[in-house]
Image (tube, coloured by chain):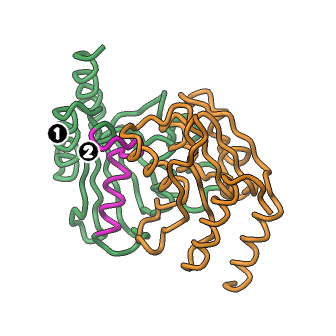
Chain colours: A green, B orange
Amino acid sequence: MPASPYWDRAFAEAEAAAARGEVPVGAVVVAPGGAIIAAAGNRTEELADASAHAELLALRAAAAALGSPRLTGCDLYVTLEPCPMCAGAISHFRLRRVYFAAYDPKGGAVEHGARLFEQPTCLHRPEAYGGFHEQAAAAQLRRFFAVRR
Amino acid sequence: MPASPYWDRAFAEAEAAAARGEVPVGAVVVAPGGAIIAAAGNRTEELADASAHAELLALRAAAAALGSPRLTGCDLYVTLEPCPMCAGAISHFRLRRVYFAAYDPKGGAVEHGARLFEQPTCLHRPEAYGGFHEQAAAAQLRRFFAVRR
């Protein structure tokens, strides 16, 4: 299982999302000094809000905590490769680095699909690293969908 | 100037955003029956939320009004070509059609940049039409930036 407290928290948020009947994705925003300033799991069904992905909720909570729309120097840990909406938000919020666990060939937009941060028009490109705890993340998603499909 | 009540409202939301010191972008969500169910202008600075683009605010308000994360059959009118974040959200919210005014070669993701709806991995592709009232929209943006740059 995940080793760092950031991954522990992100996976716990994903597990809590699954318990609510939401696709298990969890995200954590870490300040430059290392403190977790926001964490969230997916809540699209509960909030009746298709934009309520874990990343977007965590980014908005972090910005609210800091009182600024720019999260300069902050990093995001998320259990699944971000989709185009969330990758776009990560750029708008000016994150420093994005670490994600499972790759998402169908829905991801970092190393798949639109590869947003590699677009010439991308105004802010965070460093992005994928594949952390990939097996644990993939197993968590499989468990969720096995019950439902 | 814009002719339909939808464009009138979208441009009025953009103008109100400019008056608040926000980049003037306005968006309107129209239900299948033709009623405006949500309208919003950009509020990124006021809300300290880089995701508070006009489109995302209007989509979230429309979903809240309908009590559903899926806006099936609804259309979006917006004064500027949506960015990757908003184009991704438009797909997640399952909009039927997107009409936008000014093209945005630098920040747009519908007919520029990532062209999200044309990606093979895009799960829901709304019909998208750009260039409505393009000169009025471009003039509105120019007036805003002329004062500030």
- Residue A111, compared with residue A116, is above or below; it is above
Could you tell me the amino acid type at mark 1? Ala
* Callout 2: chain: A
Q: Give the numbered dot on residue A16.
A: 1
* Left/right of residue B103 with respect to residue B6 in the rendered view: right
Residues at badges 1 and 2 in contact (C-beta under 8 Å)?
Answer: yes
Q: Identify which residue, A101 or B115, lies in the foreground.
A: B115
Residue A57 highlighted magenta (yes or no): yes
* Residue A131 % position (x, y): 36, 37
Count of all numbered marks drawn on residues in the image:
2
- Residue A102, compared with residue B38, is above or below; it is above
Q: Identify which residue, A112 or B143, lies in the foreground.
A: B143
Whether residue A120 is visible, yes or no, is no
* Residue B66 % position (x, y): 41, 40
Quadrant where the C terminus of chain A sits is top left
Outermost residue to the right: B135
* Left/right of residue A140 with respect to residue B28 in the rendered view: left
* Residue A33 % position (x, y): 25, 71
- Residue A38, compared with residue A22, is above or below; it is below
Q: CA distance from mark 1 to mark 2?
A: 7 Å
Residue B60 highlighted magenta (yes or no): no
What's the residue at 83%, 63% (across, down)? B135
Range of the magenta residues? A46-64
* Residue B80 % position (x, y): 68, 57
* Left/right of residue A86 with respect to residue B55 in the rendered view: left
* Callout 1: chain: A
